Amino acid sequence: MSYPTTVEEYYQRIKTLLNENGFTTNPFRPVQYGIQFIIFMRSESGIIRIFNSKKGLTLDLSQIKNEDMKSHTQNLLTPIELERGKRLKFTSSIVKEKNGPVQFEGTPKKDPDELIGIDESGKGDYFGPLVVAAVYVNPTIAEELKKRGVQDSKKLNDTKIAELSKYIEENCPHSMVILANKNYNEIYEKIPNLNNILAWGHARVLENVLTQVDCPYALSDQFGDPNLIRAKLYAKGLQVILFSRPRAEENIAVAAASILARNKFVTYIQEISDKFKTHIPKGSGDIVMAAAKQFVKEHGIATLPYVVKLHFKLTQKLQEMATDAPTTHS
């Protein structure tokens, strides 16, 4: 299916997708440079805007104030956004738009004092979602976060992560995108490239934070080709200078983002464990394989898409085991 080229086509695509997933969608009305329409889910409502400029179609979810509703809407609309991202190409390893919105001039010797940090959790875990988070930090916020012990989430236990996450959510401009397993697997089937999905998530949370604060710089951990993120930012016309480097979690803003993402991932894993009344381990090693085999035994292989990332090699092994299992006769 081709990417929509008019606001009306985009509206119809969004309306169909949302209605298929329990939303009610009002007819659109014209606004300057585009259209807007109200969506409803249970007792919550929000406004979606679609703008059409020289850079193409832009989707604005900033008027959906309920964070759970906004996150759910973002997840559902991810495939359409990724279709747009696939059309963007950069030919050089360093992007310089002299008069354009996205700038990149290499990694600075010293991180800016005011920064939006971006990180993710769950990309290497068989069970559970992919979570991407962004957190805005200035010198005052950074000082308080350091006092409270904020650092790379890999150096903290789950209890401390939960405590710090609560503080960060209450005191820092932030955003999170959560790709639950069913949605993640549907997206990956259409666009089988984890780096592309990560780039979309990074650009999305950065866009959301920039609706809350005016910040000129962003920093993310380096994965794959960082130009993937820049392509997404360029498409949205965002005024931000993006840096990307290994071990970015050493920066307090990225560390804070890593804590938010990890806490949401751990919480989701616990929800899966409670729902299916079984222990769900993290990671993708032998312990996870044993847990997955037990899960399939108790709940059936058809349930896997709701709890795991299907593209992992573990899935093929589980499917082969299910195929080779002896048939019992009564």
Image: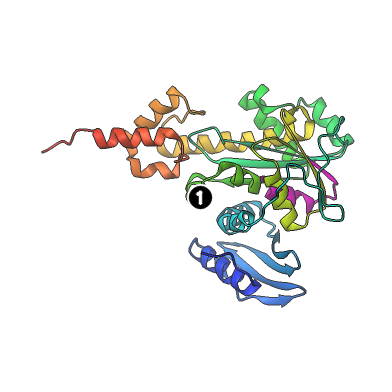
Q: Is 182 colored magenta in this rendering?
A: no
Indicate whether 94 appears above or below 145: below
Q: Where is residue 259 in the image (x, y as percent from the top left)?
A: 68, 33
Q: Which of 106 and 292 is in front in this view?
A: 106
Residue at 54% x, 63% y: name it: 18
Indicate the secondary structure of the residue bearing disc 1.
Answer: helix
The image quarter in which residue 10 lies: bottom right
Query: How far across and down, in percent of the image, does residue 75 sit?
Result: 58, 53
**Point 64% across, 42% down: residue:** 132
198 in relation to 83, above or below = above
* Residue position marked by numbered label 1 in the rendering: 183
Q: Which colour scheme is used?
A: rainbow
Spot occupied by residue 100 in the image (x, y as percentages of width and height)? 83, 55
Q: Is residue 150 left or right of residue 327?
A: right
User: From the viewer's perspective, is 33 left or right of 159?
Assistant: right
Give the residue at x 47% y 48%.
Answer: 182
Figure check: 60 above or below 141:
below
Relative depth, front residue between 247 and 74: 247
Quarter of the image with the C terminus in it = top left
> Is residue 139 visible from the viewing direction of this image?
yes
Q: Give the range drawn in magenta.
A: 202-218
Using the rendered view, name the quadrant where residue 202 is placed.
top right
Q: Position of residue 211 (x, y in %)?
A: 78, 54
Along the line of sight, the residue nearer the viewer: 87 or 7: 87
User: Visible in this render: residue 156?
Assistant: no
* 236 up-or-down from 300: above or below: below
Mark 1: amino acid: Asn
